[in-house]
Image: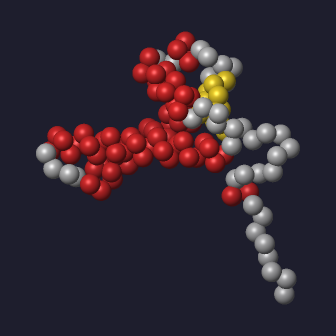
Amino acid sequence: MSVEKDFEPGFAAQMQAELIRFSGKCHYDEIKKKIIYHSLRDALNAYLTIQREEMERHKWLESEKYKNDLGRHALMDWVQKYSSDFARYWRRTHVYIQPAGSPSQNPCDAQPKIAEP
C-alpha cells in the first residue's frame, strides 16, 4: 500500500483508517490511486457512514462552541458548507468498478417492468 506516498498526511491517515475499518470490502489500487470497493452496496454504505460521522462531528463541535445542542441546524449547516467538498473528495479518492460480466447493481440501470394490456 502506498497511500502514504500518494496523499498528504491527513488524507493518507483517513484513507488508511478506512481501509482497516472496511477491510474485506475494499482495497487500495496503487495505479488508480483510489480505494476500490468490491460492491456498489459496500461503497454506498461506506460513503454514507463516513459522511454521517463528519456531520455528527460538526454538530458536536458547533454545539460545544455555542454551549447548546444545535441539533438539526448544525447538520444542515454541514450540508450547506461541506457536502460538496466531501463528495468531491470521495470521487477523487474512491471508486466502485463493476466486475466484467456481472449484472448491473445501479438501480438507475434497471429496466422498468411494463404491464401488458
**What residue lies at 69% left-to-right and 20% top-to-bottom?**
31
Q: Is residue 100 left or right of residue 8?
A: right
Q: Position of residue 22 (x, y in %)?
A: 57, 35
Looking at the rendering, which quadrant does residue 71 occupy? Answer: bottom left
**What residue lies at 20% left-to-right and 51% top-to-bottom?**
69
Does residue 63 appear in this view? yes
Pick the quarter of the image with the N terminus: top right
Location of residue 6 with respect to 66 vertically, above or below: above
Location of residue 51 with respect to 23 vertically, above or below: below
Q: Residue furthest left?
A: 67
Q: Is residue 102 left or right of residue 45?
A: right
Location of residue 10 with respect to 94 vertically, above or below: above
Does residue 83 appear in this view? no
Q: Position of residue 103 (x, y in %)?
A: 81, 51
**What residue lies at 74% left-to-right and 57% top-to-bottom?**
109
Q: Residue furthest bottom?
A: 117
Q: Position of residue 13 (x, y in %)?
A: 46, 22
Q: Position of residue 87 (x, y in %)?
A: 50, 41
